[in-house]
């Protein structure tokens, strides 16, 4: 008899983590799987950051940390916000968490009441919807398409707003599409939100530095949106520090205080050594990680060129992050090697079993016509993976 809570029984498993686990199982069986499913840079954490962590160990940083983060780290975050985003936050407005995912969970827990609606432009990062549901919120999906670069328009936002709308969550650069909202596009959304003063915005900027067009813009830079925007960021992607688990927010004081209170009852403060290392990471000039961004840009060109040679893959050119999100709906209804492809999940599973390449179904991101392919892998792996996909589909 299942004695588990309805909450956990109704919760979906993270599709990206599930696909990574399935790929690991197949590898354990001796299969040569190429993993293009996880959003994890394949670079090592830069040495200057590792040195700072070693120094922190040697200096005996081993005690509980303040719930909202070391003051020195919060000061480094404030300096970073000012330097990179033209945002002026104060110490009480910054909360450090165990990864940006915890930051998002905190926000949902302190902001949402049962029935509150959260607008999610599709495709959205895989966990947004279930984080919202865990706090009894209602995800409201706004479908976009490859033709609009997977970006929500002001008209779509206006149409999605109801008396129950409490928040809008989006990422730019976007996971999974790589789309980047321009200042003008965000202003158009802000003009809609201006008419609805009780709606709050979560701006997830974790891929901020992995931007190929230059010029990242934050919603909170608009004076009329600053007091309604929660800016979420972290070091996982840009600094290749996924396992270090440090994320943070800049938010109105009352929201930051609530997140601090919530976190105090769940995990308390984030890891002491990781926090000391992140001070060094954020104080560094962003040019120190440019070599990674340059390599991602090369891989983007490579994977787009290779995918263009496969019939039935429709791609746009992502402007940031390290994913392509091709529309593969032309394969729906077809039978290949005895397997019928009815949807993106079937297609993704087919690629894993027949091409031995792990991708993620777009259904996990609120889009049923696409799959997500990560190019956070070596050029050699990308070439081999796309060759296998082409062969399996031919």
Image (cartoon, rainbow, N blue to C red):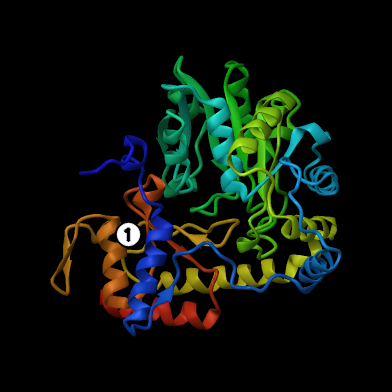
Depth check: give the residue in front, 247 or 98.
98
Residue at 13% x, 72% y: name it. 338
Residue at 38% x, 60% y: name it. 18
Q: Is residue 216 above or below residue 331?
A: above
Depth check: give the residue in front, 251 or 305.
251
Quadrant position of the N terminus in the picture: top left
Residue 197 horizontal/vertical position (percent)? 61, 16
Residue 30 horizontal/vertical position (percent)? 34, 85
Q: Is residue 172 above or below residue 301?
A: above
Helix, strand or loop at mark 1: loop
Residue at 36% x, 63% y: name it. 313
Q: Is residue 263 left or right of residue 170?
A: right
Residue at label 1?
328
- Determine if residue 89 is in view: no
Crowdedness near tag 1: few (<14), some (14–19) or many (≥20) residues, C-alpha within 10 Å: many
Quadrant position of the C terminus in the picture: bottom left
């Amino acid at each position: 008899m299942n004695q588990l809570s309805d909450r956990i029984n109704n919760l979906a498993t993270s599709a990206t983590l599930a696909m990574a686990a399935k790929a690991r199982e197949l590898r354990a069986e001796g299969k040569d799987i190429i993993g293009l499913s996880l959003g994890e840079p394949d670079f090592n954490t830069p040495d200057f950051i590792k040195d700072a962590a070693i120094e922190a160990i040697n200096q005996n940083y081993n005690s509980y940390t303040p719930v909202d983060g070391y003051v020195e780290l919060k000061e480094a975050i404030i300096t970073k916000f000012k330097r990179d985003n033209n945002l002026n936050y104060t110490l009480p407005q910054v909360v450090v968490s165990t990864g940006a995912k915890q930051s998002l969970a905190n926000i949902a827990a302190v902001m949402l009441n049962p029935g509150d609606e959260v607008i999610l432009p599709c495709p959205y990062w895989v966990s947004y919807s279930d984080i919202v549901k865990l706090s009894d919120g209602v995800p409201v999906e706004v479908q976009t398409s490859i033709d609009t670069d997977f970006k929500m328009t002001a008209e779509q936002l206006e149409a999605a707003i109801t008396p129950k709308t409490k928040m809008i969550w989006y990422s730019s650069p976007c996971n999974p599409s790589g789309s980047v909202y321009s200042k003008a596009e965000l202003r158009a959304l802000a003009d809609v939100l201006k008419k609805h003063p009780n709606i709050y915005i979560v701006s997830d900027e974790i891929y901020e530095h992995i931007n190929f067009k230059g010029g990242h813009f934050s919603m909170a830079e608009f004076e009329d949106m600053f007091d309604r925007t929660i800016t979420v960021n972290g070091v996982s992607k840009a600094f290749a520090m996924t396992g270090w688990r440090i994320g943070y927010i800049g938010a109105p004081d009352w929201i930051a205080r609530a997140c601090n209170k919530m976190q105090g009852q769940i995990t308390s403060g984030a890891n002491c050594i990781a926090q000391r290392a992140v001070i060094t990471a954020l104080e560094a000039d962003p040019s120190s990680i440019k070599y990674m961004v340059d390599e991602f840009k090369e891989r983007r060109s490579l994977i787009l060129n290779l995918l263009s040679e496969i019939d039935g893959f429709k791609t746009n050119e992502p402007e940031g992050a390290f994913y392509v999100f091709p529309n593969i709906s032309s394969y729906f209804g077809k039978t290949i090697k005895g397997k019928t492809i009815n949807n993106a999940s079937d297609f993704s599973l087919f690629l894993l079993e027949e091409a031995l390449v792990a991708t993620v179904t777009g259904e996990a991101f609120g889009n049923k016509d696409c799959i997500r392919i990560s190019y956070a892998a070596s050029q050699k792996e990308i070439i081999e993976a796309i060759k296998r996909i082409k062969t399996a589909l031919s």
